[in-house]
Image: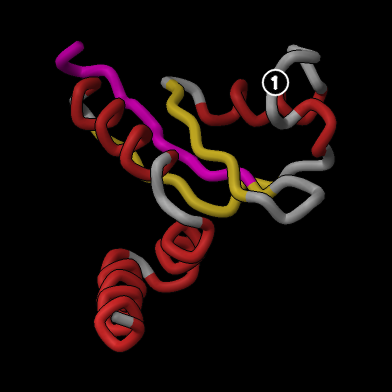
Amino acid sequence: MGDREYFVDILRCSDHSPYAGLTTDLEIRLAEHKQGADPRSYTYRRRPLELIWSASLRNHDEAFALERQIKGWSRAKKMALIEGGVDSVHEVVRRKRLTRRHSN
């Protein structure tokens, strides 16, 4: 696991939904999703697809944790990451907290 590179990525589906995943080969992963290699995949009926964000990590456990974290995020947080990076994600969270406080 030491020298291997892991990629956490987000694909944009034809319905504009973001799909996060983890792979060791970004090109192969994208090609498989674009070709519809697995009819049970979330992306199968949502083609064409576009790679819109990726991060490279050297540690599998960290890559896996990042993928799981992103999968659990709202669409707004995923789009903030794609468009502006981590700082934008923090801003989305801050705005949600303020909205909750004012609605209570």
Amino acid residing under circle 1: Ser
Horizontally, residue 41 falls left or right of residue 73, namely: right
User: Could you say which is closer to the camera, residue 29 or residue 77?
Assistant: 77
Give me the residue at 65% from left, 30% from top. 30
Q: Secondary structure at mark 1?
A: loop
Give me the residue at 29% from left, 70% from top. 93
User: Is residue 85 shown above or below 63?
Assistant: below
Horizontally, residue 46 falls left or right of residue 60, namely: right
Give me the residue at 40% from left, 73% from top. 84
Image quadrant for the N terminus?
Answer: top left
Horizontally, residue 90 falls left or right of residue 25, namely: left
Horizontally, residue 31 falls left or right of residue 10, namely: right
What's the image's color scheme? Answer: secondary structure
Give me the residue at 48% from left, 70% from top. 83
User: Is residue 100 shown above or below 5?
Assistant: below
Q: Which residues are magenta?
A: 1-11
Q: Quadrant of residue 99?
A: bottom left
Image quadrant for the C terminus?
Answer: bottom left
| 8 in the magenta segment | yes
| 77 in the magenta segment | no
Where residue 21 appears, as percent x and y from the top left, is 49, 31
User: Is residue 52 shown above or below 86?
Assistant: above
Which residue is labeled 1 in the image? 41
User: Could you say which is closer to the camera, residue 9 or residue 2?
Assistant: 9
User: Could you say which is closer to the camera, residue 63 or residue 98?
Assistant: 98
Q: Residues within 10 Å of mark 1 (few under 14, many from 20)?
A: few
